[in-house]
Amino acid sequence: MKLPEPQTRTFSSLVGEIEKGQIKIPQFQRDFVWTMQKSAGLIDSIIKGYPIGTFIFWRTKERLRSVKELGKQVLPDPEQGELVDYVLDGQQRLTSLFASLRGITLTREDGREDDFSRIFIDLNAEESEQIVITDLEGKNEKCLISILQLLTGDFMLLASYPQQYHEKLKIYKNRIESYQYWHWSVKT
C-alpha cells in the first residue's frame, strides 16, 4: 500500500466522476442521514468559501461486491481495470453535494423522499446570513434561485433576474464551480 496523497478536485470533476461510476460508496458505510437543511448549510459554506472537510478515498482496481446507490440514481460500473475511489470518510458530505448540485431526489430507508432540487439561494441574503435555504416561507420567490437552476440555467434564465442580482448570480455560480474539494487517496 502506498502512502495517502492529498489532492483537490473541482465541482465538475467530482460530480463527473460520481456520474461515471468512478466514485462509489461501499455497503459498509452507514445510511445517508443528513437533512436537506444540513445539506443546504454545506452548500452555504462552499458559497462563502469556508472549508468543508476532507474526503478520504480508497483508490483501487478491485471491485467490492456491494455498493450503495445515491437515491434513485443508477450509476454505471466503471470499466474493468479502471481505478475506483471508494469513500472511506465523507459519505454524508459527498452525497449531500451530489444531491444538491444535481437536484436529485434521495429516498431514505423509511421511504421518505427528499427533493434536493428544492434547495435555494436567497439573493437578498447578506454574506453574514444564511444564503442557501430550504424554507421559503416569507421569502419573495423572485429573489430565489435553486442551486440546480444556478448551475444549469442558460443565459436567458440568469438574465431574467433583476439587474441588481446579476453580480451575485455570477459570483455564487463561480464559487461553487471553482471550489477545491480536498481529498486523500489511499492506493492499493
Image (cartoon, grey):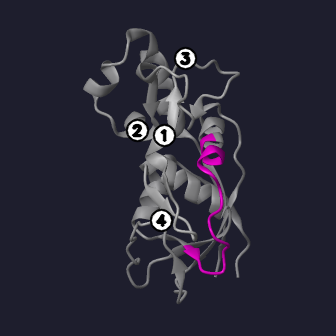
For disc 3, the marked residue is 124
For disc 2, the marked residue is 151
Asked whether the residues under the numbered discs 2 and 3 touch, taking CB atoms below 8 Å apart as contact, a structural biologist would say: no
Q: Is mark 4 on a helix, strand or loop?
A: loop
Closest to the camera, between mark 2 and mark 4, is 4
Asked whether the residues under the numbered discs 4 and 3 touch, taking CB atoms below 8 Å apart as contact, a structural biologist would say: no
For disc 1, the marked residue is 177
Closest to the camera, between mark 2 and mark 1, is 2
Name the amino acid type tagged 1.
Glu
29 falls in the magenta region: yes
For disc 4, the marked residue is 71
Closer-to-camera residue (24/99): 99
With respect to residue 136, does 23 lie above or below? below
Closest to the camera, between mark 2 and mark 3, is 3
Of the two numbered discs 2 and 3 on the same chain, state the one appearing first in sequence.
3
- Gap in angstroms between the C-alphas marked 4 and 3: 31 Å
With respect to residue 186, does 112 lie above or below? above
- Gap in angstroms between the C-alphas marked 2 and 3: 19 Å
Of the two numbered discs 2 and 4 on the same chain, state the one appearing first in sequence.
4
Name the amino acid type tagged 3.
Asn
Q: Give the range drawn in magenta.
A: 25-40
| Count of residue discs | 4
Q: Quick check: 156 left or right of 35?
A: left
Of the two numbered discs 1 and 4 on the same chain, state the one appearing first in sequence.
4
- Gap in angstroms between the C-alphas marked 1 and 4: 23 Å
